[in-house]
Image (cartoon, coloured by chain):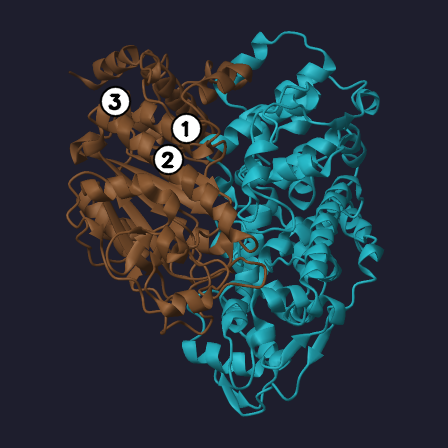
Chain colours: A cyan, B brown
Amino acid sequence: MNKKHILHLYWRAGFGLLPKQLDDLSSKSREEVVDALFLESAKITPLTINTSSLDSFTKEALDKSRVLRLEYNKLNVGLIKDYSHKWMDRLVNTNETLREKMTLFWANHFSAKNGRINYVKNFNNTLRKHALGDFRKFVKAVSKDTVMMQFLNLNQNNKSKPNENFARELMELFTLGVGHYSETDVKESARAFSGYKNNFEGAFVFSKYQHDKGVKTFLGETGAFEGDQIIDIILKQKQCARFISEKIYGYFVNENINQSHVNLMTEVFYKDYNIENLMRYVFQSDWFYNAENIGVKIKSPIELLVGMCRTIPLRFNKTEELIRIQTILNQRLLYPPDVAGWKGGKNWINTNSILVRVKLPSMILERESFTIQPKGNFTDKFKLVYVKNKYQEKLNVSVDWKTYKQHVKKVTSNELLFSLVLCEINLGTQNYLKTLGKLTKKKNLAKIMSLPEYQMC
Amino acid sequence: MDRRKFLKNSALASSVFFVPSFLKAFENVDLCSYGYNKLVVIQLSGGNDGLNTIVPYRNDIYYKARPKIAIPKNEVIKLNDEIGLHKKLQPLKRLYDQGDLSIINNVGYPNPNRSHSRSSDIWHTASDSNKYLKSGWIGRYLDFYGKHTHQAIEIDDSLSIMLQGERRNGIATRSASFLYKGLHESNFNKILAYQNSKHLNEHNLGYLYKTMIDAKSSATYLYEKTQNYSSTQDYPTKNPLANQLKTIAQFINSGINTKVYYANLVGFDTHAGQVNTQDRLLDLYANSVAAFVKDLKRNNTFKNTLILTFSEFGRRVKENAANGTDHGAANNVFVIGENLKKQGLYNDLASLSDLDANGDVKYEIDFRAIYATILKKWLKVDASRILNSSFNSLDFI
């Protein structure tokens, strides 16, 4: 398989490749390379965290005591931070690359957040479990997940007092898109989803007393529908297959949608709503490897960070610093901005974020000082934000240069550039690179990674 | 003057070695043709308790709802027979007496959201509470009427959504020299030195380069334009808002062509032990604004400056068990400037016997009507283009 195409595939389906891995794969056919990618992700490995420090808290005790609740919340905040660091480590170290990339995609599609670690962990693993599975089961699982139910007030949706928030977003953002349902459909489906609750442990509970058993008319069908049946009716609409295909195309192929390609994807997906089949079809298609699709996507902050960490084995030693970098770059794991998720593309880039992106490699690799602070949180106490912040500090990262040097032992600097930068390098920048002369391996890497071209994949 | 000459001259004049022509030279409308007015937006982040800020000191419901944290009648700075200011707002009382302050009560929006980040986004993007916009109202102002990224400045390290448009962005900087020096530390300048605008296109990579070039030219402009100015005004020390406002005054008084500034004071999320915290924060707020206004007046720039203060929501009328208050809804907004049309209290406080289902103050004035008024009457642009719908203008300016 053509090396450029392998890199393209691995940047979209994963987080890039080392020169050595690229060499190994180049002797295989496209079919073999794609098959291997799926084979590696066949397994589902949940992301776990030890939450035994919360075991002693009971619902009854928490309901009674404010002091206890504050303590409980604080522990949760800390554990969620640890969990996000574990997620980052997973993204960097996993061989189940495609599954993790898909999980990241779905986390921004079914965008929700919560302040309790056990709910957050379950939701994250629900996304991982279904990431390449059956979309029908996926949507049903998400509709019964505590994080989603609480985020979109589904647990407050009762027979006598319906809350339409979830029903609306289910159609607008998760399955059909604006304009493919009516306000009546929103109201009627909200009735079908009434009675959805969760218990303290985060398990789904169906309250038949709060469920509206009456007849509903939804997207032209009439019956005493429950939530799952509403989802079945939604999936009968070809628009649903199209909506998801278009979103996948925008994320994995090109933000400029080619309708004829999306039409092909829609046909594939509508057959069985199998996500793996759809993705396999995309990665096997000739058009996926068209030049206009290669190196034209702006990396998300997580893609940027994970890509760097994979190239040079490196790890952020301090969770707080990792979170701070994510916050400054506007993509903090487990904290999507709202139910619509991160918009991506040019929205990642503004006058200030581009500065940080270009400076990041030297902050990490050359230990330049880090003089940028994220905004305070709304809930921060005044003192915390303004007094505790140290103004200048260096990032605390472990960089494994020894392994890196082994990786690139026989790699020329042109080969390195080829494996790290997918897009055509700007003419002026080519001239700039020529002036650099011979650099140490470290310096060379930092220079490449701070090119605007490195922001693309 | 032909275009090429113009380009060359303007490059020399600002001593920016490279002017990104494709961004700047070919637009013939300058924001200055919309006047010299400037807007300063201050956010009290965390949700300032408006009811203890503008106090209904004769209202029994108020004192009944807040037995522990209500402001005692004798501590209030009285504005009239019903309403008074929080005791730490004495500096604002002076502005009030001079007719430089307008207090707009019960500002909010339909179906209020009580999450900090969501409600703050609603205020920043000027969206309905069930819509998710990815650009801010000031960002869209730049989209339609801006030319330079430094025409909207946030005094911080990262850019809030308020200043991000669909096509253009404002810029965030901690001080006049901070960005400029930051650029010199990195590869940024070296890479840009080799660029030629001819090779850049509208695609994503071109956009990255353009944004970089824009950042550089704005950072240089801000640094050079402010070099010869030094303020003689004393600002309160150990006051983060005062630091931000001092920087803004430096920009304004240096005569740069920025139209909008954004500053932020955090800490207002007073769920527990509210009284001391709010006392301290309102004290910081009032003193820094007073120094800022003095500074502007001394430089004869106050007449062209309007200061808008908001908070993402007000707080629950009833106090909670921890001597604090929980997230609420409608709140008051301060407008400070010279020659206000309606000085003092713009409208009455909302009734405390007619609250919403959560026990929060109902909104009377949509915050976007305030934005619309400022855009139309102060910044002299078409508000409906920026807000995506039309709101009736108010008559505070």
Mark 2, residues whose alpha carbon is within 10 Å: few (<14), some, or many (≥20)? many
Residue designated by label 1: B236
Q: Is residue A240 above or below residue A90?
A: below
Q: In this view, does B307 lie to the left or right of A429?
A: left
Badge 3 crowding class, 10 Å Cα cut-off, few under 14, some 14 to 19, many 20 or more, is some
> Disc 3 on helix, strand or loop?
loop
Residue assigned mark 3: B255
Residue at 66 percent of width and 50 percent of height: A104
Instruction: State the image coordinates of residue B179 (x, y, percent, origin top left).
Output: 46, 22
Q: What residue type is labelled 3?
A: Gly
Q: Can residue A276 be seen in this view?
A: no
Do tags 2 and 1 sit on the same chain?
yes
Residue nearest the observer in this picture, A315 or A436 = A315
Label whose residue precedes the other's in the sequence (3 or 2): 3
Of tags 1 and 3, which is closer to the observer?
Answer: 1
Residues flagged by tags 1 and 3 on a common chain: yes
Secondary structure, mark 2, is: helix
Q: Do the residues labelled 2 and 1 touch (CB within 8 Å)?
A: yes
Image quarter where the N terminus of chain B lies is: top left
Secondary structure beneath label 1: loop
In the displayed structure image, the side of residue A397 where residue A233 appears, left or right:
left
Looking at the rendered structure, which numbered label has been put on residue B287? 2
